[in-house]
Image: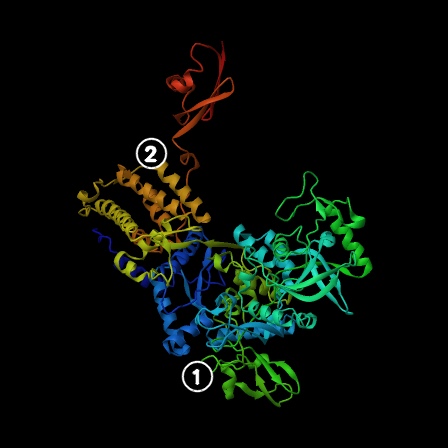
Amino acid sequence: MPFEPYDAQRIESKWQMRWAEQKTNEPDLEKAEDPFYTLMMFPYPSAEGLHVGNVYAFTGADIQGRYYRLQGKNVFEPIGFDAFGIHSENFALRVNTHPQKLIPQNVANFRRQLKMMGLMLDWSHEVQTTDPRYYKWCQWIFLQLYKHGLAYQDVAPVNWCPKCHTVIANEQVIDGKCERHPDTEVERKKLKQWFFKTTAYAQQLLDNLEWIDWSEITKTAQRNWIGRSTGADVDFRLEGRDDTLRVYTTRPDTLYGATYMVMAPEHPLVKDLVSAEQAAAVAAYCEAATRMKAVDRADAEREKTGVFLGANAINPVNDQPIPIWVSDYVLIEYGTGAIMAVPAHDQRDYEFATKFELPIIPVISPVEGGLPDGEAYTDEGVMINSGPYDGTPSLECLKKITVDLEARGVAKATVQYRLRDWCISRQRYWGPPIPMIDCEKCGTVPVPEDQLPVLLPEIEDFRPDSPGGKPLERHKPFFETTCPTCSGPAHREADVSDNFLDSAWYFLRYPSADNDNVAWEPEKTRKWLPVDLYVGGNEHAVLHLMYTRFLCMAFKDMGLTEFAEPFKKFRAHGLLIKEGGKMSKTHGNVITPDAYVEQYGADTLRMYLMFLGPYTEGGDFRDSGIVGIPRFLERVHRLYSNILGAADGATETRDSSRDGAETPQRGALEKKTAIKLHQTIKKVGDDIPIFAYNTAIAALMELLTEMRGAPALDDFALEAFPILLAPFAPHEAEELWEMLGHKDSICDARWPEYDPALTLKDEVEIAVQVLGKLRGTVSMPRDASKENIETAVMADERIAKHISGRQVIKVIHVPNRLMNFVVKG
């Protein structure tokens, strides 16, 4: 029968409709025998819609799901939308539209675009964070953490923009100004906030990185964020006072070299210790420091600044007074917010001491050679200028001095972490209300679980409030309530929770999304979780993944799940650039997929994006490069139309003037074609699990060239090719599969098996040695005879010169690997 020519729009709309009608991508979660849960990170549905960077990410994850399904797995690939948070709210404010109306429009557009791309998504288990049926369980999770002592309220410093009337993140503070209002100084305020105790799991979060199957770059980012260090808390007596200043140091062995101390500007003792003469200078310095971005303050390359406090501390090892300074390079969030400064052995301290002409006393000397000039010495060595410890190896002293100071009661061996508890409070409108109630009589009490969800009211004026106020506080029907304990008047918590909470557990909800009675069903969870493969951006390698891991560990300890890690395997995708430049809204070069799909089809866009370079590294999107992919798909389609149509006696549709290829007959494969086919089956099957999509597609292109030039193609070859193509171009693969006479979806086919004997290369490189020394190589047909190899060797002048004129005593032949000539003379 004649087949229609390649038409991407016709083919793709046909198969998307059929997949939906036949529920092709909706596995039976209860009956699945070999479950495989694959997931792309939760998308945030921006008003601008899906861009090709999103398509790049989703396509790469989808290829994995399709491949493992062809391997016989029951694949679950769900989807949802992370639509709460400040980004959505800020856009709603900008366009003056209520987020309750705006967000559903954004979600609908994202849903349309995702379906347009032919992703193997199970839409029957879709979740949305803005749906009360979802955020009810966010609130339930909060209550479980509160019940187990892992949620608490405390006063904490925040960045406040007077024009935004809201708290903003550190990343939104640029040179002390709000990124949205560059003319506005950001203020530092202390507000009562809700926290989750992530630090309770700091060591487990670190330990598990040793065995989880994640890329090393991601694990390194997590290790650095957790920031474990071992050292000692040391108390320095304050001169003229009865109290002490505690510091945490990883180098107690350098205590004799401590010549000054530094406190963070936010340290609560600064105001108590500052002298009257220094009060004005210290106050001005501290005010300026608190407006700085934390990342800038931590920049080791930045010039050091500081102010003398006008007070001294007493070094506990030698009773010498040392001055106390205030400097912004010390952060209140790390350690105790105060340090002992050892300029001879810490580069930051050295630069500070040099600038302010403070003493520099070396206490560790290299075993060989002298101390460096113009910089701190930070390696190991032998103790000097350290009283009774002189001559002791520094590593030995580190332990000994800690034990000695512990015995005197002025120090304690300590493990510290850079990780801080997770602040989940947001003084905004667009988020799930925190399920707590404040009662004058009973204090802070949780909302009873049977009263969940605490609904976010649709209030007309949702704009952020003036300092100290919150949008939900203004809405009296929400804010004013009764205490569930004493039934007296009370107030609801007016903060909403961070949308990182919404996205930290959604993978647990997906399998049970159709059950409103529980957050997750135990049996389904036991069967499908943890997630087998998680794909996402490395920009979320720290916070999102850390929060997710924390919750999993807490859930396991609470008896809510049976696993402590959420994702068996995590891989981060690369980033796209556009014509050599970073793709961003600021540069005006963000690309939406719609026009490309309309012109070329989704299969073309999918394949082009995957062909740009290694998936984990990204690539450069250039309009000029995409045209080769539709030509490839047209040739694939034409080959099958011609050979299958010719077999049925139909008129060929081949346009030989365009590609010059003859139409193969149906019949036995030549050995050359069989070798190429089996090599490609192996190559594509090896490349997909390691995300090497670009080389897999290149192999498919080479195979197509071989097939088009072959005299004949057998049924195995004709069926294998669309299966290999299916993860990359699923619509065209389905069309080819139907053309071959199949009634079922290609998704239910099985990955073809290759013959290992046919995957070996036709030619091999033979190493040629003379008296055991390598003199060169010759390329020979596989299994070439010893005599033919000798002939080839003697024809190669570079090798033959080492043999000619000499008596060959023996030739050692290792088939397909080695020829060693033993010669004399």
Residue at mark 2: 672
Residue 84: tell me if it is visible. Answer: no
Judge whether 31 appears above or below 445 on screen. above
Q: Residue at x 46, y 64 (%)?
A: 42
Judge whether 617 appears above or below 714 on screen. below
* Kind of residue at disc 1: Asp
Q: Residue 703's spot in the image, x, y percent?
A: 33, 41
Q: Of the residues under marks 2 and 1, which one precedes in the sequence?
A: 1
| Disc 2 and disc 1 in contact, CB within 8 angstroms | no
Relative side of 376 to 743, left or right: right
**Which element type, helix, strand or loop, lies under badge 1?**
loop
Residue 461's label in the rendered image is: 1
Q: Residues within 10 Å of mark 2 (few under 14, many from 20)?
A: few
Q: Residue 425's spot in the image, x, y percent?
A: 55, 74
**Which element type, helix, strand or loop, lies under badge 2?**
helix
- Dividing the picture into quarters, in which one does residue 558 lie? bottom right
Q: Residue 719's spot in the image, x, y percent?
A: 34, 46
